[in-house]
Amino acid sequence: MPEISKAVLITGCSSGIGEATARRLATGGWTVYATARRLEAIEHLRDSGCRTLALDVTDEHSMQAAVEEVERTEGAVGVLVNNAGYSQGGAIEQVPLDAARRQFETNVFGLIRMTQLVLPAMRDQHWGKVVNIGSMGGRLTFPGGGLYHATKYAVEAISDVLRFEVRGFGVDVVLLEPGLITTEFAANAMAKNSEISTDGPYTEFDAKVSALTTGVYEGPMRRLGGGPEVVAKAIEKAISRRRAPTRVPVTPSARLSILQRKLLPDRVWDAAMRTQFPQPK
């Protein structure tokens, strides 16, 4: 019987969680294929023992080529970490549909397609792990982030169904739900938000959302979060276990926020949001 491949393919490794995970797993003895849209953005990860591939999760040819390269060398992608993603901010009324579609292409459809591509070889070797990087934002919502939350709610549903569908083939599905993670994510989200027109009824609202987001990432709330390394550590622990966990909240901010949302009725949650965000009117 051929040896089982446990090679790890990680999307979105140019910075943040993807970069930290690639470094940690490679130095921990895993065979890691770190990927990003621009190969030059991840060349430095070779110094940590990673192999690098260009991969754009919005491009079919790019996704196929990356998976085929790993399978040609290793026999199968043993662990897929679906990490690539970003946040599109802005009130739902004012976000252009093209921007909304790009958000779903990266955060949802790319994740689905990458999973579809790696599963046949995982099934053949009767072993595999699919790790989806969701968010506490898949269990609750904050004003101004509706489209991002929608993608992460979708990742929750996909992960739950997929876990049932592939378990009999020896494949585990693990969903991570990071809370406040101090990476370039917030800055990138603000940049995406700034691309949306702020003229009109949401001007004050958008400005307040931007200020609050910056304050959360730079203020005292940081103590309830963590760096990308805490997510990388959780991923390593999850894929190393014989019985993989199904859902892993990461950081105190995630566990606390998810619990609060679970306990509070909708109207109470909405009232709490109005104490922090100006309601457009």
Image: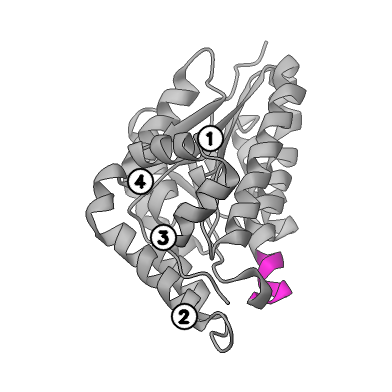
Q: Which amino acid does label 2 sit on?
A: Glu
Dot 1 lies on which element? helix
Q: Which residue is drawn at 41% across and 42% down?
A: 22
| Mark positioned earlier in the residue sequence (1 or 4) | 4
Dot 4 lies on which element? helix
What label does residue 228 carry, if any? Answer: 4
The Cα atoms of the two marked residues, 2 and 1, are separated by 29 Å
Dot 2 lies on which element? helix
Q: Nearer the viewer, mark 1 or mark 4?
A: 1
Q: Which of marks 3 and 4 is in front?
A: 3
Q: Quadrant of the C terminus?
A: bottom right
Q: What residue type is labelled 3?
A: Thr
For label 3, count other residues whose C-alpha is less than 10 Å away and answer few (under 14), some (14-19) or many (20+).
Answer: few
Q: Answer left or right for 2 relative to 187.
A: right
Number of numbered discs: 4
Q: Name the residue under label 2.
A: 204
Q: Name the residue under label 3.
A: 275
Was residue 97 drawn as part of the magenta stretch in this picture?
yes
The Cα atoms of the two marked residues, 3 and 4, are separated by 30 Å
Question: Residue 69: horizontal and vertical position, in percent?
Answer: 63, 44
Q: Quadrant of the N terminus?
A: top right
Q: Which residue is drawn at 70% across and 18% down?
A: 167
Q: Which amino acid does label 4 sit on?
A: Pro
Was residue 8 drawn as part of the magenta stretch in this picture?
no
Q: Mark 1 points at which residue?
A: 262
Magenta segment boundaries in residue numbering: 95-102
Q: What residue type is labelled 1?
A: Lys
